[in-house]
Amino acid sequence: MFEGLRNKLQSIREKFGTSIRDAAGSDVREVEKPVEAPSPAPQPETVSAPVLPEAPKVAPAEPERVVPAPVKTVPVEPKKPEGIFSRVRSFVIERELVISEKDIEEPLTDLEMVLLENDVALEVSDAILAYMREDLVGKHRKIGSSVDDIVSTALRGALLKVLGDGFDLPAYIDSHERPVKILVTGVNGTGKTTSIAKMAHYLMGQGYSVVLGAGDTFRAGAIEQIEEHGRRLDVKVIHHQEGSDPAAVLFDTVDYAKAHGIDVVLADTAGRFHNRKNLMNQLDKIRRVVKPDLVVYVDEAVAGNDAVVRAKDFNDLVGTDAVMLTKADMDPRGGAAISIAQTIGKPILFLGTGQAYDDIVPFRPEAVVDELLGVEK
Amino acid sequence: MLDSLSSSLKDALKKIAGKTVVDRAAVEELVRSLQRALLQADVNVKLVMQLSQSIKRRALEEEPPKGMNVREHVLRIVYQELVGLMGGAGKVELAPQTILMAGLQGSGKTTTTAKLARYFQRKGLKVGLICADTFRPGAYSQLATLAKKINVPIFGDPNEKDALKIVREGMKHFAGAQVRIIDTQGRHALEDELIEEIVNINEIARPDHRWLVIDAALGQQASEQARRFNDAIGIDGVLLTKMDGTAKGGGALSAVSETKSGIVFVGAGETIEDLERFEPDGFISRLLGMGDLKALAEKAEEVIADGDMDVNAIMRGKFTLRDMYKQLEAVNKMGPLKQVMSMLPLGGLQIPDDAYDVTSTKMDRYKVIMDSMTNAELDDPQVISGSHVQRISRGAGVSPDDVRELLKYYRTMQRALKGMRGSKFSMQRMMKRFGKMQ
């Protein structure tokens, strides 16, 4: 995931850099440093190491950390090893500089196109651009700050803002009364049932006991599907018949968990469209009956602009506490993650990354942004 | 968001309207709002750029034909370019054939397989379904349950892991059937083994059609996925699913453009009957968030016999209970009211949500209540007083409150329609505009 977006962001960053350099004109000094001489081994790790600590250097929130002299070099293209062997350049602003909107309009447009191409929804990419603009335009840039840093910090800040915080599920379970009830919602075909099986597998791996509630009583074959998952994972599945009341099934599931001292209830629901009032009312009823601790909204990483619309409707109508993004392996872009997180302001819990039970990854925004901006771990 | 988008598109169109010469700035503004509308609808970014370039070029370079004003000229170009993008509707023959279903996980292959079976069954063909999804738990029982509902035979084995074996045996099993539809496991283009599996299924079954199922919400990834599927088995049609949500289905356009095929069917609903042939005009309107009179008119014609419901009378504000009764009757066949209304070019007009907030059980009750009314009451609901309400409620076996609720609903609808008449986007003008676009 995210490779596509990362590569594009790289070139956009350079473009921003160029525009800002042009704006600064002669006030920018070019610092060149041959890398192979001072550093003992030109491995990617050694070169990219300074990138991380440098990032917050010019963050507006921490102005005191501005380093006046260009002491470190910044690899302009950390992804290309040949650049490391030749020379690494860094442009440094010599005098105070104010960036005007005009200076960065062109790279901003390019950034917008890149975001859109990567399935970041239109309004969300607008938000990212607004953050960038706010961060870059009109602020005084201090002597000695590196142009590349200014750009990456702004981009990093904007992305972190839209991605929101992560969510530590084991910590949450530990700090709440058992059983912790997790209700899974979403539109049709996003992978709710598969995700429940994966979450069960993940939680059991963390030492929690789990019970599944077959709350999808509508779709043909749904109960058989979750039962089969239960058999394979050796997890109890509470189910009624097809067409029965989902709230009753899930109520029984919670009862079972209480009686047997189970840690976590994973409650499945039928996929439904957010514009179907009756079905959303039913979901609301389920929520009232089950009283879940967490409502996890499941959507797929390949969804386009509609991801935003439906995530918002689900959040408005039944509430969402966290998001699980499935099918992340289909798509190296990952724009939907950015879109959904920004729209409803709720953390992303997990990424689903394949067909096996192990293919579930806890989502860490910092790590994702690092990956997007090409920071090596 | 969407409303503001389509209205900015309409504003851009309006600006062009007054001009005698094509104005570069106006065209550029139109193209920009068109771009945003299409991107919002998940159309591939590159396609959007190509399209807008060529619209801009043609609008500025081509001379408007005699007798056509600037706005009509530009609109015609926009429409033509969009239709070009659509590639026309995919072909369906009512002949013996084998169809292979392909698509991503969760795109709706199994449901659509059952819907297709129903479609061909209703056309009088003998259908057999083969369940080659040996991976997803419950896949066989899902298809089997659906097939049982419509009495279509199914071949498959939930315990068999070899999809190729099932296809081989299934093709033999259904040698006598006229239409064989093979449902397959969901897969995506980066899963090499699964792609190889479908290539093998394709070789064994030698299907006449290989249709790609695309979820309406699929974003920019649609092109890439469609391209790989096309490389692997050669896609000759696209099935667009889940159009009953709010997604616009722009991903299907990317798929069509990659596979050089067309959209064959559109799935919009959870029942087995909810499958329609693709109509490019309606699709364009949905993409742009602009009304689609053609589809509405045709739909209305299909459902309502001549003279049953006078759309123009309603637009003039004459909306009686009788009209509402017909509307309720038609609603089942035409789809939810909101969908019907969304096909009308109402501009920024907001219809109150509670006007749509009528469940199907309520609709049935409303019809029973109206059955207990006299003709005079139906034609002029003003006459319904307290004693009328009592009589009607007794006759219909409902409480007087229910009757009052119906009258309240009627007034809401009437108000909404009156608002429509008063809005700047008059029906006649829109009719004219769309008529000339084509």
Image (cartoon, coloured by chain):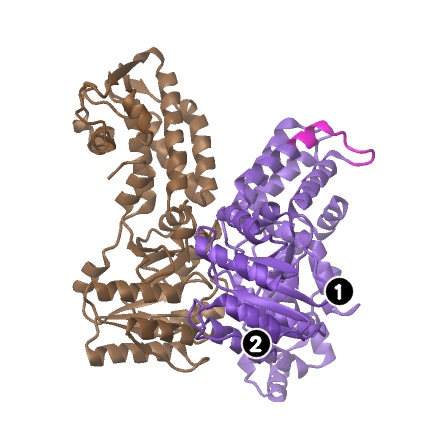
Which of the two labelled residues, at mark 2 and mark 1, occupies the earlier sequence position?
2
Q: Which residue is mark 1?
A: B301
Up the image or down, A23 lies above or below A56; here it is above
Residue A308 lies in the magenta stretch: no
Look at label 2 and name its amino acid.
Answer: Ile
Residue B47: image location, x then y, percent: 58, 40
Up the image or down, B335 lies above or below A146; here it is below
Q: Residue at x 37, y 32 (%)?
A: A10
The chain coloured brown carries which letter? A
Q: Decide if residue B15 is on the left or right side of residue A38.
A: right
Task: Give whichever of B337, A90 is nearer the camera.
Answer: A90
Number of residues whose C-alpha sits closer than 10 Å to that of mark 2, classed few (under 14), some (14–19) or many (20 or more): many
Instruction: State which region is magenta.
Output: B56-68
Q: Label 2, label 1: how many angstroms apart (C-alpha)?
A: 37 Å
| Between marks 2 and 1 in the image, the one whose residue lies nearer the viewer | 2
Residue A7 lies in quadrant: top left
Colour of the chain lettered B: purple
Q: Decide if residue A197 is on the left or right side of residue B408.
A: left
Question: Is residue B240 something that shows in the picture?
Answer: yes
Q: Decide if residue B314 is on the left or right side of residue B270.
A: right
Q: Residue at x 73, y 59 (%)?
A: B297
Number of residues whose C-alpha sits closer than 10 Å to that of mark 1, classed few (under 14), some (14–19) or many (20 or more): some
Residue B398 lies in quadrant: bottom right
- Residue most extreme to the top: A26
Question: Is residue B271 something that shows in the picture?
Answer: no
Up the image or down, B206 lies above or below A32; here it is below
Q: Which residue is mark 2?
A: B154
